[in-house]
Amino acid sequence: MLFIDNQGINDPRINLALEEYIVRTFEPEEDYLLFYINQPSIIIGKHQNTIEEINADFVKEREIIVIRRISGGGAVYHDLGNLNFSFLTKYDSTKVNNFIQFVQPIVDALHKLGVPAEMTGRNDIVAEGRKISGNAQFSTTKKMFSHGTLLFDVNIEDLVNALNVSGEKITSKGIKSVRSRVANITEFLVQPMTLLEFRQFILQEIFKNEAEIRTYQLSEAQWAEVHQLSKEKYQTWEWNYGRSPEFNIRRKNKFDFGIVDARIDVKDGHIKEIMFFGDFLGHGDLREFEQKLLNVRYEPQDLQNALAHLDLQAYFGQISAEDFAKFLCD
């Protein structure tokens, strides 16, 4: 495994571009590890409706950067007390949504620091029932990454105020507030340490079976391509906010694999436009999926027939065509 030096950059628009650049251009024969720490920002899941996930007034007041990532899952708040990690490997179907394969070394390292960390639910690491890390994945045909956050010493008040949490998520988790279910790792440490000391400890634990921490330095030409990707994608309104459809039907439900929010425009009994939002972890291209449902009659059987030819697990999670059609029409 090679550790990638991000040169201490704290701009999420660069760090997310770097992550995407690596997974799309680096050779899959080698595994890579990337760490980055972002300035105050909200990182929106690929399938989410940005406007509905953020507290726009608070975000504007605090000048918080809002940026969409290419992986699924829910919105997360980052600041300079948050350590982010990304494992980049060759694509392996057995690793898809199998987060423990990636985060076990981190969980083990947390245990050595006295943190009672454990993997739970779809994609979370918790300590004493409170979330200290969330994880998501992205894959191409050859490569994939599994990345996550580690809440080391995040400003919890800003985290709470910056994000809007849906009623479905609150109801499903049986919680009173975000504040009651998240925690900083610093709360559990036996001995205090800084974020940079914590970063170095985690890094050394991950590479403990290797003679040295081999480090990859991007060339000037590679950095130029990362900055170009950042400018053309991660710094644009179209990518970060763009999908805001008009619709006349809305269907929303909390499934085992996450919340699915469908916006459907039906004319003359046929679907003229359809868009999906949510915190599900599917890795398929939703625009491609949505196109397959255009002009289909808005009837359960017709939708079931159309869905039967699509890989619903890749796009959303484990669900039958019949149940998904019922969800859309119920």
Image: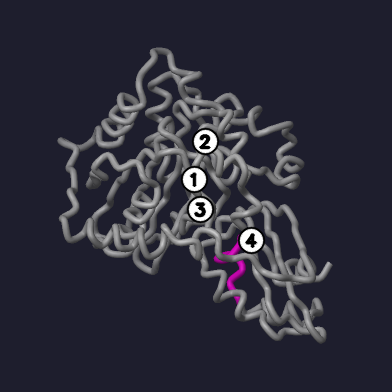
Pointer 2 with pointer 3, Cβ within 8 A: no
Q: Which residue is mark 4?
A: 277
Q: Give the CA distance from mark 2 to mark 4.
A: 24 Å
Type of amino acid under label 1: Asn
The residue carrying mark 3 is: 97
Q: Amino acid at mark 2?
A: Ile
Horizontal and vertical percent position of residue 316? 61, 62
Quote the CA–CA distance across marks 3 and 1. Answer: 9 Å
Q: Which mark is residue 125?
A: 2
Q: Secondary structure at mark 3?
A: loop
Q: Are marks 4 and 3 in contact (CB under 8 Å)?
A: no
Which mark, residue 135?
1
Helix or strand or loop: what does disc 4 sit on? strand
Using residue 41 as the reference point, say whether residue 37 is left or right of it.
left
Expressed as whole percent of the image width and height from the top left, the position of residue 116 reads 50, 23
Residue at disc 1, secondary structure? strand
Q: Earlier in the sequence, mark 4 or mark 3?
A: 3
Q: Is residue 28 visible?
A: yes
C-alpha gap between disc 4 and disc 1: 18 Å
Mark 2 burial class by Cα count in 10 Å: few <14, some 14-19, many 20+: many
Q: Nearer the viewer, mark 4 or mark 3?
A: 4
Residue 3 visible in rendering: no
Picture layout, residue 145 above or below residue 163: below
Pointers 2 and 4 in contact (C-beta within 8 Å): no
Indicate the quadrant where residue 183 lies: top right
- The range drawn in magenta is 310-317
Q: Earlier in the sequence, mark 4 or mark 1?
A: 1
- Above/below status of 204 relative to 63: above
Q: CA distance from mark 4 to mark 3?
A: 19 Å
